[in-house]
Amino acid sequence: MRIGILGGTFNPIHIAHLILAEEALSKLKLDKVIFVPTFIPPHKNVEGDARPKDRLKMVELAISGNAAFEVSTFELDSKKKSYSIDTLKEFRRIYGDDAELFFITGSDLLKDLFSWKNVNEIFKMSKFIVANRPGYPVADVPKEAETVVITPIEVSSEDIRKRIKEARSIRYLVPERVREYIIKNRLYA
């Protein structure tokens, strides 16, 4: 089994996350992609007023209808700082040594990569995949990593939160069910 792992705050999840997952699924010939919302990311703050349960619900709404997409609550259930190495160990425990794990990240994270906890062990436990992201060139990719080129979509969670604060539309930047959830629960306003 070939399993893609896509972690993030998903604060909120948006179309670029979904396009990345879909194109990685196809280009890497994965059997599925598992979205893993973080509880507390080690390298950035979770901004806005979306609680972990809200971020989880938005991921669930966004991926419903795609049988190749799943969500894992492993990091949220831990209720502590989320480290990729711990998540990979858990997925290895669940899926066994025969599964191929593909850890998918964006080129925006390359600059901090070698500050990650046990990054060399991450490289050994998974195929480390770097996807292009607008404004962040795919440069200085470590030899242990592979790159995947995806359709560049310049959308960010930060911009979506800003648009909401400014009472601007986010229609088509997030799935419609996510947009409705944000409005109904008055998130980021």
Image: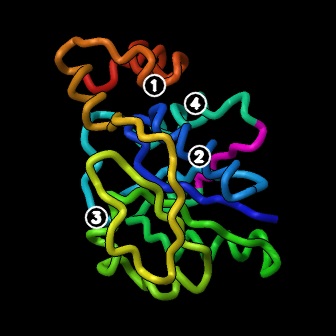
First reached walking from the N terminus: tag 2 or tag 4: 2
First reached walking from the N terminus: tag 4 or tag 3: 3
Residue 183 at x, y percent in the picture: 39, 14
Please tell me which residue lies in front, 105 or 48.
105
Dot 1 lies on which element?
Answer: loop
> Which residue is at 63% across, 34% downward?
63
> Which residue is at 55% across, 38% downward?
18
Tag of residue 62 = 4
Tag of residue 117 = none
Please tell me which residue lies in front, 74 or 12.
12
The type of residue carrying mark 2 is: Ala
Q: Give yes or no for contact between labels 2 and 4 (Cβ–Cβ under 8 Å).
A: no
Cα distance in 3D space between marks 4 and 3: 25 Å
Cα distance in 3D space between marks 1 and 4: 8 Å
First reached walking from the N terminus: tag 1 or tag 2: 2
- Badge 1 local density, few (<14 within 10 Å), some, or many (20+)? many
First reached walking from the N terminus: tag 2 or tag 3: 2
Q: Give yes or no for contact between labels 1 and 4 (Cβ–Cβ under 8 Å).
A: yes
Cα distance in 3D space between marks 1 and 2: 14 Å
